[in-house]
Amino acid sequence: MPATPARLELIALPDFPFVNQGDDLSRLVVEGVARAGVPLQDGDVVVLAQKIVSKAEGRLVDLAAIEPSAEAKTLASQVLKDPRLVELVLRESRRVVRARPHVLIVEHRLGLIMANAGIDQSNVDSDGRDVALLLPDNPDASAESLRARLHAASGAAVGVVINDSFGRPWRRGTMGIAIGAAGLPALIDRRGDPDLFGRALQVTMIGFADEIAASASLLMGPADEGRPVVLMRGLTWRAPPNPAAELLRPETEDLFR
């Protein structure tokens, strides 16, 4: 058994600026850790709220420019939502999973099962317009790009997780999950490892990046907290890196589809 206590440190970067299209998030993070007095170190994990990644990548859509299809109008009347928003949801989705008044669950084109295809209108500076924010086009690629740029800027080998709030079908309340990851194992397969009594684990696979995202969410908050970037220090892992896409359950393993 370990002789010393394990310790994990979470640091929400203070005074992080509002992010606009084209902003260099790696530069903003490096400036943010400097303000906080915690320059990046090897093994750190930088967790970023999905919204600032989407904003930097220009994923903001003006709803005034959206012409809803007949399908979107029909579905909007069922779920009691803006037909333009529903049109965006359909464009970002593979299929509709469930539709009820005020509820629209879809399979996102990335394979995520989520409400409204992850499209959000909260904490978005609209400048008087009616706008919506889409998920990053490829969150794992976004995370990898950020990881590489942070390494170039700081010299530190860090992990990156892009965090989004998700509802869960059998539990109330949202929590953070990883939609993008780089520089760390999003999924760790512990099958075959011994437990405390030497018995081999049979089914244990750890959603490592999801656990990181959920922990960071405790500091990020869902409303007006203004803490979109959290530095996590003290984690260790031995598994090789893999992307957040590895967390998606294959259709052949889905007992509820």
Image: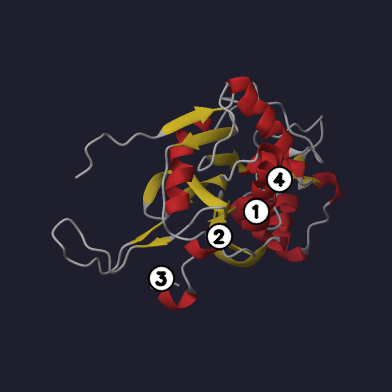
Image side of residue 256 versus residue 41, left or right: left
- Labelled pair 4, 3 in contact (Cβ < 8 Å): no
- Looking at numbered disc 1 in the image, what kind of residue is underneath it? Glu
Q: Mark 4 and mark 1: span between their CA atoms? A: 9 Å
Q: Mark 2 and mark 4: span between their CA atoms? A: 17 Å
Q: Which residue is disc 4 drawn over?
A: 149
The residue drawn where x is 61% and y is 28% is 33
Element marked by disc 2:
loop
Task: Locate the C terminus and report the quarter of the image it occupies.
Answer: bottom left
Q: Which residue is disc 1 drawn over?
A: 144
- Looking at numbered disc 4 in the image, what kind of residue is underneath it? Arg
Element marked by disc 3:
loop
The residue drawn where x is 68% and y is 49% is 148
Q: Which residue is disc 3 drawn over?
A: 256
The picture quadrant where one finds residue 156 is top right
- Looking at numbered disc 3 in the image, what kind of residue is underneath it? Phe
